[in-house]
Image (cartoon, helix red, strand yellow):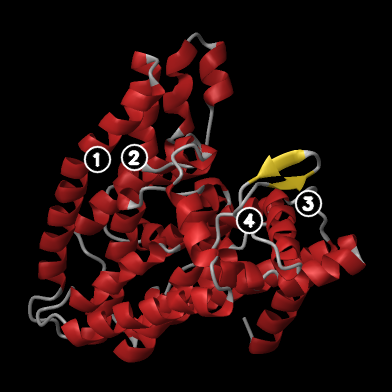
Amino acid sequence: MSRKAVLLAAGMAVAAGFLWTPGRVWDLQIYAACARELRGGGNPYARNVVVEDEGYPCMYPPLAIDLYRPVTALLDANPRLGVRVWNALQVFFFLCQLWIWRRYFLDEGIDAARLIFALIGFGGPLFVALHSGNGAMFESLLLWAAFALFAAGKDMPFVIAIAAAAMIKLQPAAFFVLSLLRPRPAWRYFLLGGAAFGVLFGLNEAVHPGLLGSFLDRLADTRNGWRFERGPNNCAVLGFVQHILETAWGDRASAYDWARRLFVPWAIFVAAVTGAALRRVWSAPKDEAAARRATVLLVCAAYALLAPRFKDYGYLILIPSALAALESDIPNGLRAAIIVLAMLNSTKAVAEKIGMGQWALFAGYFKLYATVLVWGVLVRRPPAPAR
């Protein structure tokens, strides 16, 4: 495909994002309300913001809420135009990630098939982001830009980019560990990244005095409903275990506590197996860049199994790892299983109709099952594409 054809297709995709109106885009409306509260000098964490007569908590740091101010101003001036511009940006960010994946992390392959999988695999993270209005696509782009810098051997810009990405939802700060996953751990960059994160996060207090403490209090509040979110919308291992225990016991508090206890040995197991695979990746690599790429893909798969909360739109980070697993030398049956599980998303309603009752919950975690298989493939045969 020529460069002109690619640019034309990309322009058409962004135009389609601009023209498409997905509905209520709840997350965008919620954080626009948070931005209005902040703009008016209020404390968005003191109480829930109201959207269509329902209250919702503001769960982003103050500076992350500031990022919503431009689109909020556009929404206030013209709601439909604001949503369309937001959608167009989401599609553009998605296209940027496609380019990064193809340029830095994937070998030669059938790009049309990859695009289809990226669009509909794991519940279609792009469409989930468009429907919800969540800003995860921007966070994901920052992360993949950071991973590209890591793959290119640019460690200082990498940790700065990770620090910036972690300003929105904090959890991506876990990727600082990439600096240590090599024969000679780069503690210098790991510590510099942590310092950069601390400085950037501290700017929340400098720019909005007094609000950082309120944000942390809100984040720590165990009454927040998002802590108990699970199923297709949050296919995290922690939520899965909690869901099983709560269904079995009928006691949410006990399930919450025990799920966290049981998660510890699981995390140790995943970290240990992933570490062993990474040692094989870095054992006298002929190409350091290939080893770095393989490390990113493997760590992203492990991250999906270790993240305490892993939302449906967050699965975009797993697409390149899944493609690397699917394109590796594995049995066709295993390849088909990964594809089918990644495409199913949820069949909970069907499971209930055939009599599974409360245990139909297992039909809501197909994305997680596919993730376990992807991780299993990559730890057994760590990806190291030749360039």
Tell me which label, 3 or 4, sits earlier in the chain.
Answer: 3
Q: Looking at this view, name the residue that lies furthest to the front.
A: 210
Vertical comparison of 166 with 158: above or below: above
- The kind of secondary structure element at disc 3 is loop
- The kind of secondary structure element at disc 2 is helix
Dot 1, how many residues are within 10 Å of its Cα: few (below 14), some (14-19), or many (20+)?
A: some
Q: Can I make out residue 133 in this image?
A: yes
Tell me which label, 2 or 3, sits earlier in the chain.
Answer: 3
Q: In which quarter of the image is residue 41?
A: bottom right
Vertical comparison of 121 with 294: above or below: above
Mark in front: 1 vs 3: 1
Decide which of 243, 100 is in the foreground and name it. 243
Per the image, the residue denoted by label 2 is 238
Q: Which residue is drawn at 61% across and 73% down?
A: 93
Q: Which mark is residue 129?
A: 4
Q: Looking at this view, name the residue that lies furthest to the top.
A: 355
Spatial CA span between label 1 and label 2: 6 Å
Tell me which label, 1 or 3, sits earlier in the chain.
Answer: 3
Dot 4, how many residues are within 10 Å of its Cα: few (below 14), some (14-19), or many (20+)?
A: many
- The kind of secondary structure element at disc 1 is helix
Tell me which label, 4 or 1, sits earlier in the chain.
Answer: 4
Q: Can I make out residue 14 in this image?
A: no
Q: Which amino acid does label 2 sit on?
A: Leu
Q: Residue at x 51, y 62 (%)?
A: 114
Asked if the residue at tag 2 contacts the one at tag 1, i.e. Cβ–Cβ closer than 8 Å, the answer is: yes
Q: Which mark is residue 245?
A: none
